[in-house]
Image: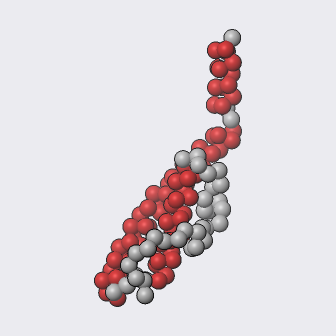
Amino acid sequence: MSEQVFDEDRRRHMSSKDTWLRGFFMLVVAIIYGIAKTLVLVVALFQFVATLLNGRPNRQLLEFGRSLSTYTYEIALYLTFNRDIRPWPFSPWPSQTAVTPAPGPSRD
Protein backbone atom coordinates (compact mmCIF):
# COMPACT_ATOMS: atom_id res chain seq x y z
CA MET A 1 0.00 0.00 0.00
CA SER A 2 2.74 2.51 0.89
CA GLU A 3 4.48 1.86 -2.45
CA GLN A 4 1.28 2.78 -4.25
CA VAL A 5 1.05 6.07 -2.31
CA PHE A 6 4.70 6.75 -3.13
CA ASP A 7 4.03 6.19 -6.86
CA GLU A 8 1.02 8.51 -6.77
CA ASP A 9 3.09 11.23 -5.08
CA ARG A 10 5.83 10.80 -7.67
CA ARG A 11 3.31 11.08 -10.54
CA ARG A 12 1.82 14.20 -8.99
CA HIS A 13 5.27 15.79 -8.63
CA MET A 14 6.30 14.83 -12.15
CA SER A 15 3.16 16.35 -13.67
CA SER A 16 3.26 19.60 -11.68
CA LYS A 17 3.00 22.49 -14.13
CA ASP A 18 4.61 24.84 -11.61
CA THR A 19 7.73 22.68 -11.41
CA TRP A 20 8.03 22.40 -15.20
CA LEU A 21 7.50 26.15 -15.57
CA ARG A 22 10.25 26.79 -13.05
CA GLY A 23 12.47 24.41 -15.02
CA PHE A 24 11.87 26.48 -18.16
CA PHE A 25 12.71 29.72 -16.34
CA MET A 26 15.79 28.07 -14.82
CA LEU A 27 17.01 27.24 -18.33
CA VAL A 28 16.48 30.83 -19.50
CA VAL A 29 18.16 32.26 -16.40
CA ALA A 30 21.09 29.82 -16.73
CA ILE A 31 21.74 31.11 -20.25
CA ILE A 32 21.63 34.70 -18.97
CA TYR A 33 24.01 33.65 -16.16
CA GLY A 34 26.59 32.56 -18.73
CA ILE A 35 26.39 35.96 -20.41
CA ALA A 36 26.58 37.77 -17.05
CA LYS A 37 29.71 35.83 -16.05
CA THR A 38 31.40 36.92 -19.26
CA LEU A 39 30.35 40.50 -18.61
CA VAL A 40 31.89 40.32 -15.11
CA LEU A 41 35.21 39.34 -16.71
CA VAL A 42 34.96 42.23 -19.19
CA VAL A 43 34.26 44.70 -16.37
CA ALA A 44 37.20 43.29 -14.40
CA LEU A 45 39.51 43.71 -17.40
CA PHE A 46 38.36 47.29 -17.98
CA GLN A 47 38.82 48.08 -14.30
CA PHE A 48 42.34 46.68 -14.40
CA VAL A 49 43.20 48.82 -17.42
CA ALA A 50 41.56 51.89 -15.83
CA THR A 51 43.61 51.33 -12.69
CA LEU A 52 46.81 50.98 -14.72
CA LEU A 53 46.13 54.20 -16.62
CA ASN A 54 44.55 56.34 -13.90
CA GLY A 55 45.83 54.84 -10.68
CA ARG A 56 42.26 54.09 -9.55
CA PRO A 57 39.19 52.14 -10.70
CA ASN A 58 36.48 53.80 -12.78
CA ARG A 59 33.61 54.97 -10.50
CA GLN A 60 30.81 54.07 -12.97
CA LEU A 61 32.25 50.61 -13.51
CA LEU A 62 32.51 50.14 -9.74
CA GLU A 63 28.80 50.80 -9.39
CA PHE A 64 27.87 48.64 -12.38
CA GLY A 65 30.19 45.87 -11.20
CA ARG A 66 28.55 45.90 -7.79
CA SER A 67 25.03 45.60 -9.21
CA LEU A 68 26.17 42.97 -11.73
CA SER A 69 27.72 40.95 -8.91
CA THR A 70 24.50 41.19 -6.93
CA TYR A 71 22.60 40.09 -10.03
CA THR A 72 24.74 36.98 -10.53
CA TYR A 73 24.22 36.19 -6.84
CA GLU A 74 20.46 36.48 -7.29
CA ILE A 75 20.67 34.12 -10.26
CA ALA A 76 22.62 31.56 -8.23
CA LEU A 77 20.05 31.76 -5.43
CA TYR A 78 17.21 31.18 -7.91
CA LEU A 79 18.94 28.29 -9.69
CA THR A 80 19.68 26.53 -6.40
CA PHE A 81 16.08 26.93 -5.15
CA ASN A 82 17.17 29.28 -2.36
CA ARG A 83 15.00 32.02 -3.81
CA ASP A 84 11.66 31.84 -5.59
CA ILE A 85 11.75 35.35 -7.06
CA ARG A 86 12.97 35.25 -10.65
CA PRO A 87 15.90 37.60 -11.29
CA TRP A 88 15.99 40.30 -13.97
CA PRO A 89 14.47 40.48 -16.64
CA PHE A 90 11.53 39.02 -14.73
CA SER A 91 11.98 41.37 -11.76
CA PRO A 92 13.79 44.70 -11.26
CA TRP A 93 17.55 44.99 -11.69
CA PRO A 94 19.26 44.88 -8.27
CA SER A 95 20.09 48.22 -6.72
CA GLN A 96 23.69 49.29 -6.64
CA THR A 97 23.61 49.50 -2.86
CA ALA A 98 22.24 46.00 -2.28
CA VAL A 99 25.66 44.69 -1.20
CA THR A 100 28.29 46.63 0.70
CA PRO A 101 31.73 46.07 -0.83
CA ALA A 102 34.48 44.59 1.29
CA PRO A 103 37.21 46.98 2.41
CA GLY A 104 39.89 47.21 -0.20
CA PRO A 105 42.29 49.66 -1.75
CA SER A 106 41.37 53.33 -1.60
CA ARG A 107 38.93 54.32 -4.35
CA ASP A 108 39.66 58.06 -4.20
Residue at the spot 53% in from the left edge and 71% down from the top edge: 100
Vertical relation: 13 (above or below) 99: above
16 or 102: nearer the viewer: 102
Going by the picture, which residue comes out furthest to the front?
103
Color encoding of the figure:
secondary structure
Q: How many marks?
A: 0
Asked where in the image residue 45 lies, by quadrant, the reply is bottom left
Toward which corner of the image does residue 47 lie, by quadrant?
Answer: bottom left
Residue 77: give x, y in percent of width and height. Answer: 55, 53
Residue at the image position 65 percent from the left and 44 percent from the top: 21
Query: Is 58 drawn above or below residue 41 in the view shown?
Result: below
Residue 104 versus residue 25 in the image, above or below: below
Depth check: give the residue in front, 87 or 66. Answer: 66
Q: Is residue 26 visible?
A: no
In this view, which residue lies farthest toward the top?
Answer: 1
Question: Where is residue 46 shown, x and y percent of the image?
Answer: 37, 77
In the visual, does 100 lie left or right of 105? right
The x and y percentages for residue 28 are 56, 52
Residue 18 vertical position relative to residue 12 in the rendered view, above or below: below
Q: Would residue 88 be found to the left or right of residue 45 on screen?
A: right
On the rendered structure, is 12 left or right of 30? right
Q: Quadrant of the N terminus?
A: top right
Residue at the location (42% across, 83% down)?
Answer: 107
Q: Residue 27: x and y, percent?
A: 54, 48
Q: At 54% across and 56% down in the image, what residue appears? A: 75
